[in-house]
Amino acid sequence: AVAHPFDDAFVMMKQMQGELNQIKTELQNEKTRRTSEVGELQREVRTLRGQLEQALKDLTAANDRVACALTSETAIRGRALEMLRKEVADAIHLSSEVHHLKTIQATHFGKLATDFKAERHERQAGQQTLDAMLSSEVQTRTEECEMLSNQMMAFRTEWDANLREDRLNVAALVKDVNIAGQLLAGKVLDYETLGISDLATTCASSPNNPLNSTGGTVNGTLGRTSPGESRPNTSP
């Protein structure tokens, strides 16, 4: 068979038609995909635009709040600044008064210091005089105490001697009274039995004899007094 002269052209055209259809299909798919992507991008743009508008509203509201707060703070700071200025002015005015008061107080304190020094010198002089008087009085009292102590020691010595002498006298008196009692009871007939042959003479001359103080006399019997005489108290 003889080949048709347009077979190659037909085959080429058929291939080109197939490629064109494929390109159209791909173009349609790409268009569909692009349309879908554009739709998503539009939705995303709308979302972002809404978020941006909301953020803008929030920033505007925050800016308004900050502006109001700043205005209020400015007003408050302005009042505080005015009060501070007033306080500074009052402090400056008071500082002049304080300076005047300091001058007065310095003068007053100087006078008080002078008076205090004079009073201190006077008190020191009085204290020295009082110390001298006190020292003199202490010395006088010390001497008097020493003299009284010496007198007390002498009195104690004398008292001890008198006490010993009185005890000896009382012992002798008790012994004489016992002997006199025995003589009066008739138990002893003579002095020699008692071993005191000279007892009557000794008792009569003894300073411890109680008959010397009562005026009694010895009449042959020791311890017997004259009629009308009372017997001396022999208790120690």
Image: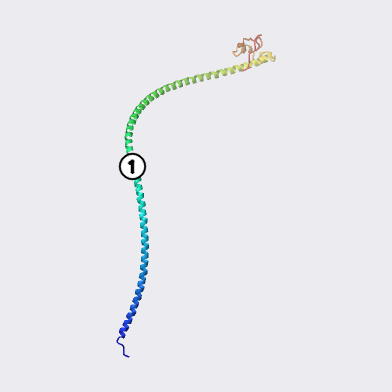
Q: Position of residue 230 (x, y in %)?
A: 65, 11
- Residue extending farthest to the bottom is 1
Under circle 1, the secondary element is helix
- Residue extending farthest to the left is 5
Q: Position of residue 117 (x, y in %)?
A: 35, 27
Report the front residue among 176 and 16.
16
Number of numbered discs on residues: 1
The image quadrant of residue 189 is: top right
The image quadrant of residue 48 is: bottom left
179 vs 42: above or below: above
Q: What residue does disc 1 label?
A: 82
The image's colour scheme reads rainbow
Residue at 33 percent across and 80 percent down: it is 17
Residue at 33 percent across and 42 percent down: it is 82
Give the left or right position of residue 139, taking residue 205 as reference. left
Give the left or right position of residue 194, taking residue 102 as reference. right
The image quadrant of residue 35 is: bottom left
Residue at 35 percent across and 55 percent down: it is 60
Quarter in which the N terminus is drawn? bottom left
Q: Position of residue 80 (x, y in %)?
A: 35, 43
Q: Position of residue 193 (x, y in %)?
A: 67, 15
Residue at 54 percent across and 18 percent down: it is 159
The amino acid type found where label 1 is placed reads: Glu
Give the left or right position of residue 109, taking residue 157 as reference. left
163 vs 68: above or below: above
Quarter in which the C terminus is drawn? top right
- Residue extending farthest to the right is 186
44 vs 78: above or below: below
Q: What is the crowding at mark 1: few (fewer than 14 residues within 10 Å), some, or many (at least 20)?
A: few
Report the front residue among 97 and 236.
97
